[in-house]
Image (cartoon, rainbow, N blue to C red):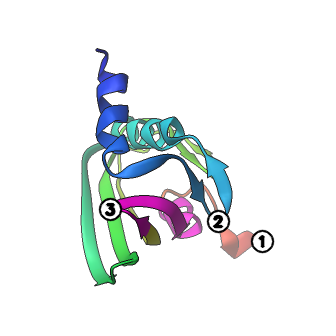
């Protein structure tokens, strides 16, 4: 079994496939691909949970992802070439849970702040 197939099996133990991400049906492979992209973009990728709340049907958390930016980072606002800088992004996710697995995710992330710290965006001249 390939590394990608192994990752997909692990993700399927936590998520249904497909699942809803911000209201859109999304193949689980897209989440695996996104995780791989982040692993390639950041050396020493670290997730810090800042706050977390759980109920039987939902898990919500605020987090910070950080690492040394060594590879191409794809964001909703555009791609960022490696900067060699330590960068971080703040985000919040809400997981909706049924029968022990995540069936929907609502997610937001401060990509604008990340792009400003990477000097990929300068709002002072806007």
Q: Which residues are magenta?
A: 97-117
Q: Is residue 58 visible?
A: yes
Separation of marks 1 and 2 at Cα, in angstroms: 7 Å
Q: Is residue 22 left or right of residue 33?
A: right
22 or 126: nearer the viewer: 22
Q: Is residue 97 left or right of residue 47?
A: right
Question: Mark 3 and mark 2 in contact (Cβ < 8 Å)?
Answer: no
Q: Nearer the viewer, mark 2 or mark 3?
A: 3
Q: Earlier in the sequence, mark 2 or mark 3?
A: 3
Judging from the image, what secondary structure is the residue with disc 2 in? loop
As for residue 10 lying within the magenta part, the answer is: no
Q: Is residue 90 visible?
A: no
State the count of labels.
3
Residue depicted at x 47% and y 35%: 33
Separation of marks 1 and 3 at Cα, in angstroms: 47 Å
Residue labelled with disc 2: 122
Q: Is residue 83 above or below residue 64?
A: above
* Residue 126, percent from left and from top: 77, 71
Residue 100, label in figure: 3
Q: Is residue 88 above or below residue 36?
A: below
Residue depicted at x 42% and y 65%: 98
Separation of marks 2 and 3 at Cα, in angstroms: 44 Å
Give the quadrant of the N terminus: top left
Q: Earlier in the sequence, mark 1 or mark 3?
A: 3
Q: Nearer the viewer, mark 1 or mark 3?
A: 3
Question: Mark 3 and mark 1 in contact (Cβ < 8 Å)?
Answer: no
Q: Residue furthest top?
A: 1
Q: Is residue 28 left or right of residue 36?
A: right
Q: Residues within 10 Å of mark 3 (few under 14, many from 20)?
A: few
Residue labelled with disc 1: 126
Question: Mark 2 and mark 1 in contact (Cβ < 8 Å)?
Answer: yes
20 or 63: nearer the viewer: 20
């Amino acid at each position: 079994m390939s590394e990608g197939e192994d990752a997909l099996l692990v993700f399927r133990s936590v998520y249904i496939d497909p699942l809803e991400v911000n209201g859109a049906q999304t193949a689980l492979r897209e989440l695996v691909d996104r995780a791989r992209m982040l692993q390639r973009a950041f050396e020493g990728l670290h997730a810090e949970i800042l706050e977390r709340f759980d109920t039987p049907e939902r898990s919500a958390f605020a987090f910070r992802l950080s690492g040394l930016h060594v590879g191409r980072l794809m964001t909703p606002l555009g791609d960022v070439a490696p900067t060699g800088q330590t960068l971080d992004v703040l985000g919040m996710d809400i997981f909706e849970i049924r029968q022990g697995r995540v069936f929907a995710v609502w997610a937001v992330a401060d990509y604008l702040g990340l792009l400003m710290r990477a000097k990929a965006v300068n709002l002072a001249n806007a």
